C-alpha cells in the first residue's frame, strides 16, 4: 500500500504542475496494481482531458501558483465546508504568488469569487463522469453543459463536453453515410472530419467507451463500403482499358503505303495514307502523293478507282467511281486529297465482309490495289461514347468530393479560418 500511496503522491504532484503525461503514467501504474482505486481513475481521466485541452495559462505564471490552483480544485470537488475553506486558502496563495511575479492569475480570481457555483459545477462533473461510465451519453452531455455554465474556469469540463459533442457528431455523420447506399456528395469531407475527431479524442479516457463505439462503427462502414467502391473502381478501370483498346483500333489504323506503278508507268510511285477501317455511313479521306521518278513526262491519265462490295460516293459527288489526274511532268510530285463516304445507312455493327477496293492505274495499265475494310470496329463508336460517360460517372462518384475539396481549398482566400 505504501508503494501505491507514493505513486499517487508523484502522480498528484505532476498533475498539479500540469505535467499531465507524467501524471497519467503514474495513475495507470496505480490502476495496474489497484484497479478499483477511485482517486487514480478519476485523476487519470482528468489528466487525459487536460492533455487534449486548449487551456492557456499566463506564460510567466509560477509553477507553485499553478499547483495551488489545481489543488484547490480537488478540495472544491470534495465539497465539504472544510474543503471549500481550504480551497479558498490555496486560491489566495496562488493569486499572491502570481502577483509577486507580476502575473494576473485571472482564473484563480474568478474561481475564488465563484466558489459556490464551482462547487455545484463539481457535483455535475462527478455525475457526468459516472454517466459516461454507464454510457449515458445524453445525460452526461447535459450535466457537463450545466457544469460549464456554473464554472467558466473549468477547462476540464469544457474540453470533455467538446469531445463528447464531437464524438456524438461523428456517430451522426457515420449514420448519415450508412443511410444512403449511393456514394454520397460530401463523403470525403465527412470521413476527414470523423477521422479528425477520432484522432483528437483518442486519449480521453473518460470517453473511451464512446470512442471505441465510434471507431467500431467507422470500421464497419468502411468494410461495408469497401466492396461497392472496389466494384466502381474496377468498372472505371475496365472502361478505361476498353476505351484505350477500341480507340487504338479506331484512330491508329491509317497506313502509309507506297504503291509501285513502275509496271504501267516506269518511274511512277504513289504514296497513300488511308483508313484501314470504316463503318457504313462514315466519311473519311485518302491522301495521295504521286512522284514521277522517270526522266520523261507522264501524259497518260492517272486513274483512281473505287470498287468492292460496299457502296461509295465521292465528296463532292461525281457521276463515276473514277478520278483522273493528267500530265505528271518529269521529277514532279503532286498531292491530292480524296473525300469519300460509304453511302450506306450507319449500322452499330457493320458487316466485316464488306470492303472497298481502291485501285490506281496509269492509262490502260494494270491496277495497283489496296483495301479498306468496312469493319465493326468503327461501329463501336457509340459504345465508346457510352464508356466515356460511365468513366465520368464513376470518376465523380469516387473522386468528386476530393476534387471539390481541393478546388475549394485552392481558391479559399488567404487567412480565412477553417470551419
Image (cartoon, grey):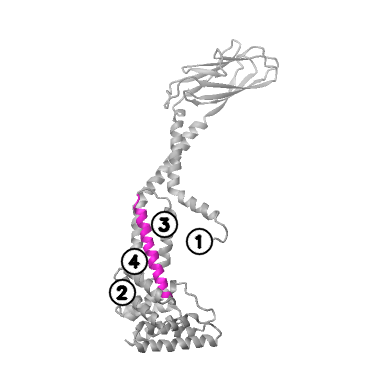
219 or 365: which is nearer to us?
219
At 37% from the left edge and 87% from the top edge, which residue is drawn?
83
User: Which numbered dot is residue 130?
Assistant: 2
Contact? badges 3 and 1 (CB < 8 Å):
no
Q: Quadrant of the N terminus?
A: bottom left
**Disc with the residue nearer the chain's start (4 vs 2):** 2
Rendering coords of residue 8 (x, y %)? 37, 83
Residue range highlighted in magenta: 155-180
Residue with the mark numbered 3: 191
At 44% from the left edge and 37% from the top edge, which residue is drawn?
387
Residue with the mark numbered 4: 210
Q: CA distance from mark 3 to mark 1?
A: 16 Å
Q: Secondary structure at mark 4?
A: helix
Q: CA distance from mark 4 to mark 3?
A: 18 Å
Residue 175 belongs to the span the image colors magenta? yes
Q: CA distance from mark 4 to mark 1?
A: 26 Å
Mark 1 neighbour density, 10 Å: few (under 14) some (14–19) many (20 or more): few
Compared with 274, 396 (above or below) is below
Rendering coords of residue 80 (x, y %)? 34, 86
**Disc with the residue nearer the chain's start (4 vs 1):** 4
**Disc with the residue nearer the chain's start (1 vs 2):** 2
At 44% from the left edge and 41% from the top edge, which residue is drawn?
391
Q: Nearer the viewer, mark 3 or mark 1?
A: 1
Residue with the mark numbered 1: 418
Q: Secondary structure at mark 1?
A: loop
Q: CA distance from mark 4 to mark 2?
A: 13 Å
Q: Secondary structure at mark 3?
A: helix
204 or 307: which is nearer to us?
204
Mark 4 neighbour density, 10 Å: few (under 14) some (14–19) many (20 or more): many
**Disc with the residue nearer the chain's start (4 vs 3):** 3
Q: Secondary structure at mark 2?
A: helix
Compared with 93, 292 (above or below) is above
Amino acid at each position: 500500500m505504501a508503494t501505491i500511496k507514493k505513486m499517487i503522491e508523484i502522480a498528484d504532484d505532476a498533475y498539479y504542475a500540469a505535467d499531465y503525461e507524467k501524471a497519467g503514467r503514474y495513475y495507470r501504474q496505480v490502476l495496474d496494481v489497484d484497479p478499483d482505486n477511485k482517486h487514480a481513475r478519476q485523476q487519470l481521466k482528468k489528466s487525459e482531458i487536460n492533455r487534449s485541452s486548449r487551456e492557456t495559462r499566463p506564460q510567466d505564471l509560477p509553477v507553485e501558483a499553478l499547483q495551488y490552483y489545481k489543488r484547490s480544485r480537488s478540495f472544491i470537488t470534495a465539497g465539504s465546508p472544510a474543503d471549500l475553506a481550504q480551497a479558498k486558502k490555496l486560491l489566495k496563495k496562488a493569486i499572491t504568488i502570481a502577483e509577486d511575479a507580476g502575473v494576473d492569475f485571472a482564473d484563480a480570481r474568478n474561481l475564488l469569487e465563484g466558489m459556490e457555483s464551482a462547487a455545484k459545477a463539481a457535483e455535475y462533473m462527478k455525475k457526468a463522469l459516472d454517466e459516461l461510465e454507464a454510457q449515458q451519453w445524453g445525460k452526461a452531455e447535459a450535466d457537463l453543459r450545466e457544469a460549464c455554465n456554473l464554472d467558466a474556469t473549468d477547462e476540464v469540463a469544457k474540453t470533455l463536453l467538446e469531445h463528447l459533442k464531437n464524438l456524438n457528431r461523428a456517430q451522426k455523420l457515420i449514420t448519415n453515410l450508412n443511410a444512403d447506399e449511393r456514394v454520397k456528395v460530401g463523403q470525403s469531407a465527412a470521413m476527414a472530419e470523423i477521422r479528425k475527431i477520432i484522432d483528437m479524442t483518442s486519449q480521453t479516457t473518460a470517453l473511451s467507451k464512446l470512442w471505441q463505439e465510434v471507431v467500431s462503427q467507422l470500421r464497419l462502414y468502411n468494410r461495408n463500403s469497401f466492396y461497392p467502391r472496389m466494384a466502381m473502381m474496377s468498372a472505371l478501370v475496365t472502361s478505361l482499358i476498353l476505351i484505350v483498346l477500341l480507340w487504338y483500333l479506331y484512330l491508329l489504323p491509317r497506313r502509309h503505303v507506297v504503291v509501285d506503278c513502275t509496271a504501267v508507268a516506269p518511274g511512277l510511285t504513289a504514296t497513300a495514307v488511308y483508313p484501314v477501317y470504316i463503318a457504313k455511313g462514315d466519311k473519311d479521306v485518302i491522301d495521295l502523293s504521286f512522284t514521277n521518278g522517270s526522266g520523261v513526262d507522264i501524259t497518260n491519265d492517272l486513274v483512281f478507282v473505287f470498287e468492292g462490295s460496299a457502296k461509295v460516293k465521292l465528296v463532292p459527288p461525281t457521276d463515276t467511281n473514277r478520278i483522273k489526274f493528267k500530265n505528271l511532268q518529269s521529277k514532279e510530285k503532286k498531292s491530292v486529297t480524296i473525300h469519300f463516304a460509304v453511302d450506306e445507312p450507319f449500322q452499330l455493327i457493320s458487316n466485316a465482309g464488306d470492303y472497298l477496293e481502291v485501285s490506281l492505274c496509269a492509262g490502260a495499265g494494270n491496277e495497283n490495289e489496296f483495301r479498306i475494310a468496312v469493319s465493326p470496329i468503327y461501329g463501336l463508336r457509340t459504345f465508346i461514347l457510352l464508356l466515356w460517360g460511365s468513366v465520368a460517372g464513376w470518376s465523380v462518384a469516387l473522386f468528386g468530393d476530393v476534387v471539390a475539396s481541393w478546388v475549394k481549398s485552392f481558391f479559399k482566400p488567404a487567412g480565412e479560418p477553417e470551419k
